Amino acid sequence: MKLNFDEIVSVAGKGGLYKILKPTKNGYIVEELNDSRKKMVLGPNHRVSLLKEISIYTTDQEGAIPLKDVYEKIKSKFSDALPVSSKDDSNALFSFLGGVVPEFDADKVYHSDVKKLVAWYSIILEEDPGISFKDDEKSEAASEKDEKKKVSKAKPKKAPVAKNQTASSKKVSQKPITPQKKG
């Protein structure tokens, strides 16, 4: 199954990852990323996190690095064989993350965060070993070009003129005539 990183979510209180199949009026229809392929509806009571919106705290000027970039670094460095698992101890997990993102903030990144990072990476690679975490520059350039076209096409609209009304008569406002009292 081909995955799009932007459609992968985590649901608080539920293990694993889910792929968004279809948005609904109040949430999403998702499919579990494992052998069961269970589908469920997530409503407003579920805490859903898109993986594309998750970041890891860093000590550099940026302050954080997107999870997508962390996964890209992991894939380029280790490919499909991770040297750790989510069941390893804190020291092993933190040294692994330090090898990938040396500037991660050890005061703000918790053991559970690194554990999820590793577990999610394993789930994603199991589902789609060929997944690319790189941003598609062509699609970004195309979306910018489309946005520029939308802006250039949006011209101010003129007020419609009725068939029997001329442009100059449209500007004259007519006030009702009230009779004056004699007195």
Image: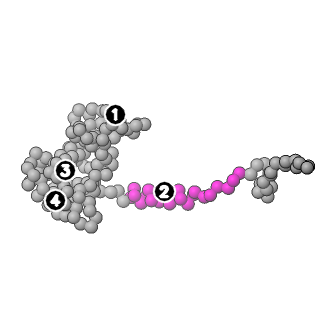
Q: Position of residue 52 (x, y in %)?
A: 31, 51
Up-down relation of residue 11 to residue 100 (above or below): above
Residue 161 shown in magenta: no
| Residue to which mark 2 is pinned | 146
Mark 1 crowd level (few <14, some 14–19, many ≥20, 10 Å Cα): some
Residue 85 visible here: yes
Q: Of callouts 4 and 1, which one flags the residue occurring earlier in the amino acid sequence?
A: 1
Cα–Cα span, label 3 and label 1: 26 Å
Cα–Cα span, label 2 and label 1: 33 Å
| Residue to which mark 3 is pinned | 113
Q: Secondary structure at mark 1?
A: strand
Q: Classify residue 135 by image quadrant.
A: bottom left
Q: Of callouts 2 and 3, which one flags the residue occurring earlier in the amino acid sequence?
A: 3
Q: Which residues are magenta?
A: 138-160
Mark 4 crowd level (few <14, some 14–19, many ≥20, 10 Å Cα): some
Residue lying at the far front of the rendered structure: 183
Q: Classify residue 18 by image quadrant.
A: top left
Kind of residue indicated by mark 2 = Asp
| Residue to which mark 4 is pinned | 106
Residue lying at the far right of the rendered structure: 182
Q: Position of residue 110 (x, y in %)?
A: 17, 52
Kind of residue indicated by mark 3 = Asp
Q: Residue at x 10, y 45 (%)?
A: 87
Q: Residue at x 48, y 57 (%)?
A: 147
Mark 2 crowd level (few <14, some 14–19, many ≥20, 10 Å Cα): few
